[in-house]
Image: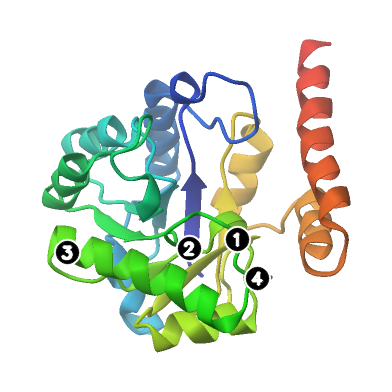
């Protein structure tokens, strides 16, 4: 089993109350304390490339989109928890307002965190053609190599939108580990189609219990994955926004 937690931006970064606002630094620290108390420890990203029998039980932390607050998160992880995470970077956003700069990415890299690809333009790849996907992966890897001295081998398609063609092109471009956004624990790990448990501001005690115990995913995530794969994206977007609105309303009652 490979447990992966996925975070996005912190509430103070987003300036909004959408579902991609995840947690504050104190809340993230509490999460790590709870995991440690449950006997789960953070693992270095490189262990993912080892044979399953050589991996220790624990969890991996991933952070998507390279938003500005991730530098402070990275520093806290290394200084307080001796934890190294994976930061998935859409390279077109580097040095833009609200995103990490080249210097900050180098700082995270020096701290021991793994800087990985999140495509170049942060667009959904599953509906693109072969060559367009190749450009997104290749350009992202090239820019990160120029910045950090080595091309990334880890990749997360934006939004988790992935199919066989995306995985094939990524592998041909040198990707060895691909993380999707499918909710799960990788009981039969496929390094080119890894599942994760996404964390957002609605992630509560029941979710943590599921994560620690390795229990099955909530029904709403299964429905979202089916819509992603087979249904209308309009319905998917309505489900996602509606689900989080309902959760928010319930918390006010």
First along the sequence among labels 2 and 4:
4
| Residue at x 75%, y 53% (from the top left corner) | 221
Q: Which residue is mark 3?
A: 146
Residue 2 in percent (x, y) is at: 48, 67
Residue 200 seen in the current view: yes
Mark 1 against mark 4, which lies toward the viewer? 4
User: 77 or 99, which is in the foreground?
Assistant: 99
| Residue at x 56%, y 78% (from the top left corner) | 166
Q: CA distance from mark 4 to mark 3?
A: 27 Å
Q: CA distance from mark 2 to mark 4?
A: 12 Å
- Pointer 2 with pointer 4, Cβ within 8 A: no
User: 122 or 182, which is in the foreground?
Assistant: 122
Q: CA distance from mark 3 to mark 2?
A: 20 Å
Quadrant holding the C terminus: top right
- Under circle 3, the secondary element is helix
Q: Which residue is mark 2?
A: 156
Question: Total of numbered circles in the picture?
Answer: 4
Q: Which residue is mark 4?
A: 126
The residue at the far top in this view is 253
Q: Please give left or right for residue 4 compared with residue 36 in the image.
A: right
The quarter of the displayed image where residue 102 is located = top left
Q: CA distance from mark 3 to mark 1?
A: 26 Å
The quarter of the displayed image where residue 29 is located = top left
**Crowd tier of the residue under label 4, counting other residues whose Cα lies within 10 Å: few below 14, some 14–19, many 20 or above:** some
Looking at the rendered structure, which numbered label has been put on residue 160?
1
First along the sequence among labels 3 and 2:
3
Q: Please give left or right for residue 73 compared with residue 111 in the image.
A: right
- Pointer 2 with pointer 1, Cβ within 8 A: yes
**Crowd tier of the residue under label 1, counting other residues whose Cα lies within 10 Å: few below 14, some 14–19, many 20 or above:** many
């Amino acid at each position: 089993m490979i447990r992966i937690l996925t975070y996005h931006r912190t509430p103070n970064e987003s300036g909004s109350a959408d579902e991609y606002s995840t947690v504050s630094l104190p809340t993230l620290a509490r999460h790590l304390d709870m995991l440690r108390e449950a006997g789960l420890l953070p693992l270095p990203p490189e262990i993912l490339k080892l044979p399953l029998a050589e991996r220790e039980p624990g969890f991996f932390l991933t952070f998507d989109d390279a938003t500005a607050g991730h530098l402070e998160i990275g520093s806290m992880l290394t200084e307080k928890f001796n934890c190294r995470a994976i930061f998935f970077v859409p390279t077109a956003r580097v040095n833009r307002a609200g995103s990490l700069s080249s210097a900050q990415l180098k700082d995270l890299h020096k701290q021991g965190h793994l800087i990985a690809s999140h495509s170049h333009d942060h667009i959904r790849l599953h509906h693109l053609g072969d060559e367009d996907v190749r450009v997104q992966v290749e350009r992202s890897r090239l820019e990160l190599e120029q910045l950090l001295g080595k091309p990334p081998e880890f990749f997360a398609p934006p939004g988790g939108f992935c199919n066989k063609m995306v995985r094939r092109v990524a592998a041909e471009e040198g990707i060895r580990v691909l993380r999707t956004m499918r909710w799960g624990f990788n009981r039969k790990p496929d390094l080119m189609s890894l599942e994760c448990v996404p964390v957002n501001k609605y992630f509560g005690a029941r979710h943590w219990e599921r994560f620690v115990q390795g229990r099955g995913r909530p029904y709403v995530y299964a429905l979202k994955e089916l819509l992603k794969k087979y249904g209308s994206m309009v319905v998917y977007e309505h489900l996602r926004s509606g689900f989080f609105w309902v959760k928010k309303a319930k918390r006010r009652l």
